[in-house]
Amino acid sequence: MAKAVRFDRYGGTDVLYVADVDIPSPAAGEVVVNVKAAGINPGEASIRKGLLDAVFPATFPSGEGSDLAGVVHLLGDGVKEFSEGDEVLGWSWQRSSQAEYVSVPTGQLIVKPPALSWPVAGSLYVAGVTAYAAVRAVSVRPGETVVVSAAAGGVGALVVQLLGVKEAHVIGIASEPHHDWLRSHGVTPVSYGDDLLERIVALVPEEVDAFIDLFGPQYVRLAVELGVPRDRIETIISFDAAKEYGTKAEGSGDASTTEVLAEVADLVASGQIEVPIAATYPLERVKDAYDELEKRHTRGKIVLIP
């Protein structure tokens, strides 16, 4: 038997619990991974609350989680890409990664670079490929100015660094406690609040070339008011606003390939970007982990350690 996060109905963090379940058996083309770290993400909280029921309905009892990193424990028939004992990272599309063991198709795993810690590797998939998709969507060129909302969050911290790799001038919207971190990564910080448009304009010598929204529809509207071309406004969360204004809304589903994940992992392993870890929690404290996540004030990733 093994431990796994479960919930039996939609609701707040109080519906989460840790259950004893059978260790899965791998199907053909799958491996069972002994999970060492599993990141948590806002989308998972929204699914648990029932906010995405029309798009991602839950079947109860439901597991939780996409991100994972761990050690290959068992091989399914026909698996030649990995061996037992290999260290891997990747994702599950079965809402099952927040557990001690999970069965995963080999096409959703890559070898973990030795330089990555378990918490970093185990929280890289959702934030990494989402950030990659968002940056790719705005087609940034060296020297251009890009504004990013929620610039110090789990995805934002990677977005601003990926933009830096592309030699963009980045303005990051974030609360004051995160400004020093943003400055240390070459980002010009600006606080939330009144007169945000005017304060951004004061920071930009000519015009804002692109805008990446990671927080909410008010920032899509702000981008339009700043005069950013609609095809260079990207949101990962404000889908109704994207339809209303004709902007882009690309996310993890648009970049969920092992090639993209490997590229992001190599950037982290080589030190070109970092993945801030806000906190780690044992699996038994899953409620506390999601409580912290849902405050929306952390810098970087929150990770469960089974």
Image: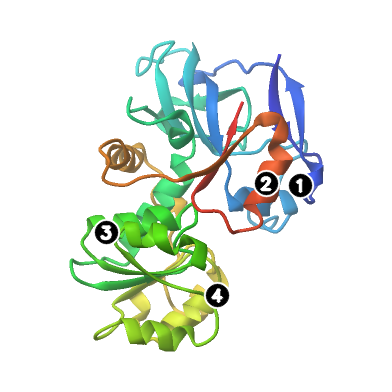
The answer to whether 45 appears left or right of 144 in the picture is right
The disc, 1 or 3, on the residue closer to the chain's N-terminal end is: 1
Residue 255, numbered circle: none
Q: In this rendering, which labeled residue sits more in front, label 1 or label 4?
A: 1
Secondary element at image label 2: helix
Secondary element at image label 3: helix
Q: In this rendering, which labeled residue sits more in front, label 1 or label 3?
A: 3
Task: Give the residue pinned by disc 1.
Answer: 13
Please, what is the three-letter code of the amino acid marked with disc 1? Answer: Thr
Q: Quadrant of residue 140?
A: bottom left
Please, what is the three-letter code of the amino acid marked with disc 2? Answer: Tyr
Residue at x 63%, y 27% (from the top left corner): 99
Q: Quadrant of residue 289?
A: top right
Residue 112 percent across, percent down from the top left:
37, 27
Please, what is the three-letter code of the amino acid marked with disc 4? Answer: Pro
The vertical placement of 306 against 138, above or below, is above
Task: Give the residue pinned by disc 4.
Answer: 217
Residue at x 48%, y 46% (from the top left corner): 126
Secondary element at image label 4: helix
Task: Give the residue pinned by disc 3.
Answer: 164
Task: Give the residue pinned by disc 2.
Answer: 290
Verify CB contact (< 8 Å) between mark 1 and mark 2: yes
